[in-house]
Image (spheres, rainbow, N blue to C red):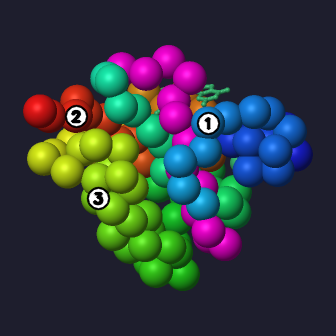
Protein backbone atom coordinates (compact mmCIF):
# COMPACT_ATOMS: atom_id res chain seq x y z
CA UNK A 1 0.00 0.00 0.00
CA UNK A 2 2.21 2.81 -1.28
CA UNK A 3 -0.02 5.68 -0.17
CA UNK A 4 -0.76 4.33 3.32
CA UNK A 5 0.59 6.62 6.05
CA UNK A 6 1.75 3.83 8.35
CA UNK A 7 3.30 1.86 5.46
CA UNK A 8 5.32 5.02 4.77
CA UNK A 9 6.46 5.03 8.40
CA UNK A 10 7.42 1.33 8.04
CA UNK A 11 9.49 2.22 4.95
CA UNK A 12 11.10 5.20 6.72
CA UNK A 13 9.55 7.70 4.28
CA UNK A 14 7.82 9.56 7.12
CA UNK A 15 9.75 10.06 10.36
CA UNK A 16 8.46 8.58 13.61
CA UNK A 17 9.89 7.99 17.06
CA UNK A 18 10.30 4.22 16.91
CA UNK A 19 10.23 2.46 20.26
CA UNK A 20 10.39 -1.16 19.04
CA UNK A 21 10.67 -3.13 15.84
CA UNK A 22 11.35 -6.61 14.55
CA UNK A 23 10.66 -8.43 11.28
CA UNK A 24 6.90 -8.43 11.80
CA UNK A 25 5.90 -5.37 13.82
CA UNK A 26 6.79 -1.74 14.48
CA UNK A 27 5.94 0.44 17.48
CA UNK A 28 6.21 4.23 17.40
CA UNK A 29 4.98 7.18 19.42
CA UNK A 30 1.62 8.66 18.45
CA UNK A 31 2.03 12.13 16.94
CA UNK A 32 -0.91 13.43 19.04
CA UNK A 33 -0.41 11.64 22.36
CA UNK A 34 -3.52 11.25 24.49
CA UNK A 35 -1.43 10.28 27.54
CA UNK A 36 2.19 10.85 28.73
CA UNK A 37 3.08 7.56 27.01
CA UNK A 38 1.13 6.75 23.85
CA UNK A 39 2.54 4.47 21.21
CA UNK A 40 1.04 2.55 18.30
CA UNK A 41 1.96 -1.06 17.60
CA UNK A 42 1.40 -2.08 13.98
CA UNK A 43 2.10 -5.03 11.72
CA UNK A 44 4.76 -4.12 9.12
CA UNK A 45 2.62 -5.83 6.50
CA UNK A 46 -0.36 -3.72 5.43
CA UNK A 47 -3.57 -4.94 7.04
CA UNK A 48 -6.43 -2.48 6.80
CA UNK A 49 -8.22 -3.19 10.08
CA UNK A 50 -9.41 -5.98 12.35
CA UNK A 51 -12.35 -6.31 9.97
CA UNK A 52 -10.03 -7.56 7.23
CA UNK A 53 -8.00 -10.01 9.31
CA UNK A 54 -8.28 -13.72 8.62
CA UNK A 55 -7.39 -16.92 10.42
CA UNK A 56 -3.94 -16.62 8.88
CA UNK A 57 -3.32 -13.48 10.92
CA UNK A 58 -3.84 -15.22 14.27
CA UNK A 59 -0.15 -15.58 15.07
CA UNK A 60 0.58 -11.97 14.17
CA UNK A 61 -2.35 -10.66 16.22
CA UNK A 62 -1.26 -12.81 19.16
CA UNK A 63 2.28 -11.53 18.83
CA UNK A 64 1.09 -7.92 18.92
CA UNK A 65 -0.89 -8.45 22.11
CA UNK A 66 1.91 -10.44 23.70
CA UNK A 67 4.49 -7.77 22.86
CA UNK A 68 2.43 -4.84 24.13
CA UNK A 69 3.23 -5.33 27.84
CA UNK A 70 6.97 -5.73 27.31
CA UNK A 71 7.20 -2.55 25.19
CA UNK A 72 4.90 -0.80 27.66
CA UNK A 73 7.21 -1.83 30.54
CA UNK A 74 10.19 -0.39 28.67
CA UNK A 75 8.25 2.87 28.31
CA UNK A 76 7.60 3.06 32.06
CA UNK A 77 4.15 1.50 32.09
CA UNK A 78 5.01 -1.55 34.20
CA UNK A 79 2.17 -0.74 36.60
CA UNK A 80 -0.46 -0.78 33.86
CA UNK A 81 -1.75 0.77 30.69
CA UNK A 82 -4.75 1.02 28.38
CA UNK A 83 -5.05 -0.59 24.96
CA UNK A 84 -7.45 0.17 22.13
CA UNK A 85 -7.98 -0.90 18.55
CA UNK A 86 -10.38 1.36 16.66
CA UNK A 87 -11.94 -0.65 13.87
CA UNK A 88 -13.67 0.72 10.80
CA UNK A 89 -15.18 4.17 10.23
CA UNK A 90 -17.98 3.33 12.64
CA UNK A 91 -15.37 2.35 15.22
CA UNK A 92 -13.53 5.65 14.99
CA UNK A 93 -10.62 4.37 12.91
CA UNK A 94 -8.80 7.22 11.14
CA UNK A 95 -5.74 5.49 9.75
CA UNK A 96 -6.61 2.33 7.82
CA UNK A 97 -3.55 0.30 8.71
CA UNK A 98 -4.24 -1.90 11.74
CA UNK A 99 -2.80 -0.44 14.95
CA UNK A 100 -2.98 -1.15 18.64
CA UNK A 101 -2.94 1.98 20.81
CA UNK A 102 -1.04 1.60 24.09
CA UNK A 103 -1.46 4.51 26.52
CA UNK A 104 -0.61 5.27 30.09
CA UNK A 105 1.11 7.33 32.74
CA UNK A 106 4.38 6.13 34.27
CA UNK A 107 3.92 5.70 38.04
CA UNK A 108 6.23 6.81 40.82
P1 LIG B 1 -7.12 5.77 14.91
O1 LIG B 1 -8.12 6.86 15.16
O2 LIG B 1 -7.06 5.38 13.45
O3 LIG B 1 -7.26 4.60 15.84
O4 LIG B 1 -5.73 6.39 15.33
C1 LIG B 1 -4.82 6.93 14.45
C2 LIG B 1 -3.72 7.52 15.29
O5 LIG B 1 -2.62 7.81 14.43
C3 LIG B 1 -4.09 8.83 15.99
O6 LIG B 1 -3.95 8.68 17.39
C4 LIG B 1 -3.12 9.85 15.40
O7 LIG B 1 -2.67 10.79 16.35
C5 LIG B 1 -2.00 8.97 14.88
N1 LIG B 1 -1.30 9.54 13.73
C6 LIG B 1 -1.88 10.10 12.62
N2 LIG B 1 -0.93 10.50 11.76
C7 LIG B 1 0.27 10.20 12.34
C8 LIG B 1 1.64 10.38 11.91
O8 LIG B 1 1.94 10.90 10.84
N3 LIG B 1 2.60 9.94 12.76
C9 LIG B 1 2.30 9.36 13.96
N4 LIG B 1 3.34 8.97 14.73
N5 LIG B 1 1.03 9.17 14.39
C10 LIG B 1 0.03 9.59 13.59
ZN1 LIG C 1 -0.35 0.35 5.44
Q: Earlier in the sequence, mark 2 or mark 1?
A: 1
Residue at image point 36% right, 31% down: 37
Q: Earlier in the sequence, mark 3 or mark 1?
A: 1
Nearer to us: label 3 or label 2: 2
Q: Along the line of sight, which residue is nearer the eye, 45 or 70? A: 70
Identify the image quadrant of residue 23. bottom right
| Residue linked to disc 3 | 69
Q: Secondary structure at mark 1?
A: loop
Residue 59, given in percent of the width and then of the height, sits at: 46, 80
> Gap between marks 3 and 2, in whole Å?
13 Å
Q: Is residue 25 magenta?
A: yes
Verify CB contact (< 8 Å) between mark 3 and mark 1: no
Vertical order, 48 against 106 (above or below): below
Q: Does ligand 1 reach within 8 Å of label 1's beta carbon?
A: yes
Q: Earlier in the sequence, mark 3 or mark 2?
A: 3
Residue 14, given in percent of the width and then of the height, sits at: 79, 33
Q: Is residue 60 visible?
A: yes
- Decide if residue 4 is on the left or right side of residue 53: right
| Residue linked to disc 1 | 17
- Mark 3 Cα-neighbour bin, 10 Å: few <14, some 14–19, many ≥20: some
Q: Secondary structure at mark 2?
A: loop
Magenta stretch: dominant secondary structure: loop
Vertical order, 41 against 17 (above or below): below
Q: Is residue 90 visible?
A: no
| Residue linked to disc 2 | 106
Identify the image quadrant of residue 94. top right
> Gap between marks 3 and 1, in whole Å?
18 Å
- Decide if residue 40 is on the left or right side of residue 86: right
Residue 8, given in percent of the width and then of the height, sits at: 80, 42
Task: Read off the magenta span.
Answer: 22-34
Quarter of the image with the C terminus in it: top left
Residue 105, given in percent of the width and then of the height, sits at: 22, 30
Amino acid sequence: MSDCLFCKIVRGEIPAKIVYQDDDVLAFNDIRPAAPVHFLLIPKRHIESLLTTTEQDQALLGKMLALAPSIAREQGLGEGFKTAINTGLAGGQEVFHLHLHVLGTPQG
